[in-house]
């Protein structure tokens, strides 16, 4: 799991995660992404935290929705994964501070 700054001037960062299969279905992805997003807002002073998932990955979209992110767009053929260009469903949350 990572939080990477994507735009320092505009205080934006992106969360990425791929938990090991053994740990799926225990709420860990939700807990970890929520903690990382809170750290970004509270400790790093970020204004926007974003994340993305494959449109077919309903569980991942659910995780991002559960932590308070909102749909932020759809990118066609955005990432090349194992030799195939894949669409990306985008989510983002903005700091209230
Ligand atoms: C997607 C993934 C991150 C979820 O991790 P996780 O630790 O199992 O997630 P959580 O347990 O925190 O929550 C999963 C949520 O999705 C829901 N869910 C799981 N499978 C689902 C499905 N097929 N359809 C709808 N909802 C589903 C769960 O019910 C849960 O929601 P709930 O708490 O409202 O019941 C994990 O399955 C994964 O890593 N998958 C493959 C790799 C990947 O896609 N990584 C993310 C790249 S963006």
Image (cartoon, rainbow, N blue to C red):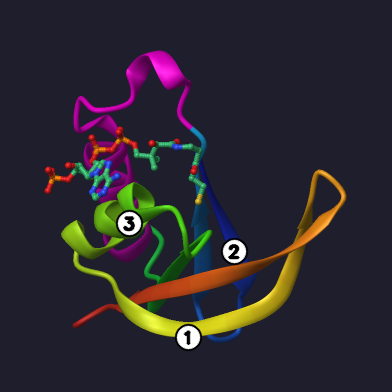
Answer left or right for 69 relative to 57.
left
Q: Quadrant of ligand 1?
A: top left
Quadrant including the C terminus: bottom left
* For the residues bearing labels 2 and 1, Cβ distance under 8 angstroms: no
Q: Which residue position is annotated with label 3? A: 37
The magenta-colored residue range is 19-43
Q: Position of residue 70 (x, y in %)?
A: 28, 78
Answer left or right for 81 relative to 5.
right
Q: Position of residue 5 (x, y in %)?
A: 59, 64
* Depth check, front residue: 73 or 50: 73
Taking the spot 45% from the left edge, 69% from the top edge, the residue there is 50
- Location of residue 79 with respect to 77 vertically, above or below: above
Q: Which residue position is annotated with label 2? A: 5
Q: Residues within 10 Å of mark 2 (few under 14, many from 20)?
A: some
* Depth check, front residue: 56 or 89: 56
Q: Secondary structure at mark 1?
A: strand
Taking the spot 19% from the left edge, 33% from the top edge, the residue there is 27
- N-terminal label among 2 and 3: 2
Q: Secondary structure at mark 2?
A: strand
Q: Which mark is residue 73?
A: 1
Q: Position of residue 56 (x, y in %)?
A: 46, 58
Taking the spot 17% from the left edge, 58% from the top edge, the residue there is 66
Q: Choose mark 1 or mark 3, whichever is in front.
A: 1
Can I make out residue 38 in this image?
Answer: no
Question: In terms of secondary structure, what is the magenta stretch mainly?
Answer: helix
Q: Based on the displayed image, in which of its 4 quarters is residue 10 positioned?
A: bottom right
Answer left or right for 35 relative to 11.
left
Does the magenta portion include 34? yes
């Amino acid at each position: 799991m990572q939080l990477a700054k994507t735009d320092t001037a505009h205080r934006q960062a992106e969360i990425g995660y791929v938990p090991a299969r053994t740990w799926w279905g225990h709420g860990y992805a939700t807990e970890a992404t929520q903690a990382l997003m809170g750290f970004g807002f509270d400790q790093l002073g970020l204004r926007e935290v974003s994340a993305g998932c494959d449109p077919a990955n309903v569980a991942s979209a659910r995780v991002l929705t559960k932590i308070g992110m909102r749909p932020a767009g759809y990118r066609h053929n955005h990432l090349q994964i194992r030799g195939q260009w894949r669409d990306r469903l985008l989510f983002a949350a903005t700091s209230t501070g």
